[in-house]
Amino acid sequence: METAVRDAFRTALAGFRRDGPVLVMGHNDADGLSAAAVFVRALRAAGWDARPRILGRGENPWSAEMAAELAGARLGGIVVTDLGVRPGAIKAGTPTVVVDHHVPTGTPEDATVITGHGFDPIPTSSLLAYWCAAGIAEAEPLLWLAALGLIGDMAEKAGFPEMETARRAYGVTALRDAVTLLNAPRRAASGDAGPALALLLKADGPKEITSGQHPETAALRAAREEVKAELEAAKKIGPKVRNGVALIRFHSPCQIHPLVAQAWRGRLKDNIVMAANTGYRPGWVHFAVRSARDIDLIGFLAEHAPPGADENYGSGHAQATGGALRPGDWNHFITGLGFGPDQQVQA
């Protein structure tokens, strides 16, 4: 698979233009940040003008807002990683590569798609990026970045040889500690993953992330403490259970709903666990869904989708998904699951 990925990326890159920068768009978690850093560093090493654009809360490469942002930009190409695979063009007329491992929801127009979905085990976006990088530059110095994404997306024990090599070279504790710090800023109230990306673009290993020798580490540590305090408060809220769905609802400016859902997953093994956060983004209810049962959670959400569900709803992995709904759609959704007015929100 590695050879096919490398060759596909190298072929796609041959169609990029040199009259503008390559925009590398990535998700703001450890896997997406690491994948974006791999692409930027490899492209720059190969002589390209590569510029990162990390997407934050509520942002989507295929949205009208992103189309407006890119409308006046002259780009040589676009690399999109860890942001899903969806129909439509991100910027018409611009060569595009989409590198991802989530369940696709469509086929993007005029783009090369490199996906790990359907393989066993499924490679993370950062590992796919590492394989792509090997086609254009010396990739070995970037191995630790791929390992960060594997740990961040819970694929550390999936059996990839790259993980074992990185474990021996850098130490698994250092890699895990770096992942914890890198994930903190995007979960904090500000949602600013800029300091995390800055570290990944200049560091030579995980210990540089955690050592404090770079000023950005202080921002990551502050974000980690903020998230820790919010998570401890949310974990004290008990679930409401209806028809096999356990709902934990709270109000926090931090992106802790996936952490809350994961924390309850092992305690409520017979239920689908849903952690809903009404304070993460004004005008929306964000929620994460997890389960210890062998159930397709994306299929479950599709079955119960309210009329207003859009690209913000029901993507990700079969065992780790969620979404965001406007209040009216949330009320419709939660009522359909059997919950009463006490779990509805005001529009």
Image: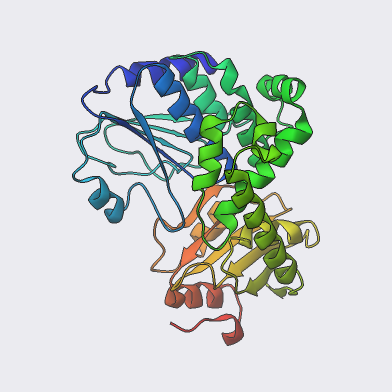
Q: Is residue 207 above or below residue 104?
A: above
Quarter of the rendering occupied by the C terminus: bottom left
Q: Is residue 116 visible?
A: no
* In-front residue for pair 308/31: 31
Quarter of the rendering occupied by the N terminus: top right
Counting every numbered tag in the picture gives: 0
Side of 347 relative to 293 (left or right): left
Q: Residue at x 45, y 53 (%)?
A: 56
What percent of the width, then of the height, locates residue 290? 66, 56
Q: Is residue 242 above or below residue 310?
A: below
Side of 266 relative to 200 (left or right): right
- Quarter holding residue 209: top right
Side of 5 relative to 182 (left or right): left
* In-front residue for pair 319/27: 27
What percent of the width, then of the height, locates residue 78? 32, 33
What percent of the width, then of the height, locates residue 225? 69, 59
- Quarter holding residue 203: top right
Q: Residue at x 34, y 22 (%)?
A: 48
Tell me how the rendering is colored.
Answer: rainbow
Q: Residue at x 63, y 73 (%)?
A: 249
Residue lying furthest bottom: 341
Q: Is residue 188 above or below residue 28?
A: below
What percent of the width, then of the height, locates residue 218? 63, 49
Q: Is residue 59 above or below residue 72?
A: below
Residue lying furthest right: 267
* In-front residue for pair 163/33: 33
Side of 84 relative to 77 (left or right): right
Q: Is residue 6 visible?
A: yes
Q: Residue at x 46, y 68 (%)?
A: 325
